[in-house]
Amino acid sequence: MKIYLVGAGPGDPDLLTVRAERLIKTADVVFYADALIPPGIIALTRPDCERIATKSLTLEAMLPLMIQAAQTGKLVLRLHSGDLSLYGAIHEQIQALHRAGMTVEIVPGIGAIQLAAARLTTEWTVPELVQTVILTRTAGVTPMPEDLAALAAHRATLGLYLSARLVDTAQAQLQKHYPPDTLVAVCYRLGWPQEKIWLVPLTEMAALTHRQRLTRTTLYVISPVFRAGATRSHLYHPQHRHLFRP
Ligand SMILES: C[S@@+](CC[C@H](N)C(=O)[O-])C[C@H]1O[C@@H](n2cnc3c(N)ncnc32)[C@H](O)[C@@H]1O
């Protein structure tokens, strides 16, 4: 008895993995967060597939439905946005499914942070400039065990999730360590028809968010790479020798 937890990518059906697409097209029952999974992905399900929107369901309401369907031999999957390893709330789901004797298989997806790099035609790790990526959020109902300003002190590429409603606090924390002219990519609904991306100095991050009325599905990426000059890796440098290029 298996339940698939599937990463649906940021929104564009073209960015599903081959495995995710195959499962979506063959599933008997699909659970999906209606606010996060665009209709284009749900449209791939079979006409007789049972589609259950989960936005207004608690985990307690959802789990028995998932378990019951799997117990009757149905192919059951739960769709999560992006990749499930980030803010997917799957930890407690996996534990409860295991307690109920279910096998869980996770199918990874493309996360918003990967699509943001692709859209901006960039790399989050540029040699000699930044070699670390921090993925974090600001505290909301979920408290933050880490301190955003302390994370900012690394001046790494920093992907900030779930923070549009708390952008003023976030900007103030980030400005404690990033230079004010550091550029921030404000990425709204990547991979959706409404996608928009702005590149602004850190000092304008909150003002832009308010002006554009962004409250949800916004990823901020604060990074030195947006001002990177000419620099290159050792890997493909003619003077660098390694196992495959002695
Ligand atoms: C519950 S988290 C899910 C993250 C998801 N698991 C991922 O890997 O992208 C939702 C937050 O992720 C970011 N996010 C997810 N999908 C996005 C998209 N299509 N465009 C912009 N930001 C997105 C936003 O910060 C949003 O508030």
Image: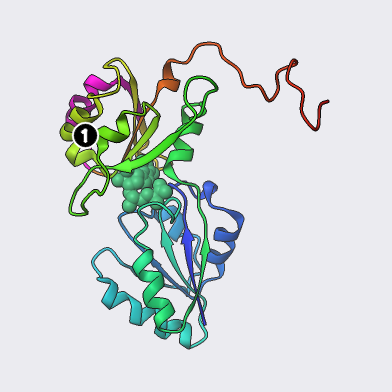
Above/below status of 57 relative to 35: below
**Disc 1: which residue:** 170
Above/below status of 87 relative to 231: below
Residue drawn at point x = 40 percent, y = 85 percent: 68
**x and y, in percent, of residue 63 in the image:** 34, 77
**x and y, in percent, of residue 94 in the image:** 41, 70
Would residue 189 be visible to someone looking at this image? no
**x and y, in percent, of residue 124 in the image:** 48, 30
Residue 209 is left or right of residue 72, and the answer is left
Residue 56 is left or right of residue 154, and the answer is left
Would residue 167 be visible to someone looking at this image? yes
Residue 20 is left or right of residue 38, and the answer is right
Residue drawn at point x = 34 percent, y = 61 percent: 89
Residue 47 is left or right of residue 175, and the answer is right
First to last magenta residue range: 197-215
Is residue 52 one of those drawn in magenta?
A: no
Q: Closer to the camera, 235 or 25?
A: 235
Q: Residues within 10 Å of mark 1 (few under 14, many from 20)?
A: many
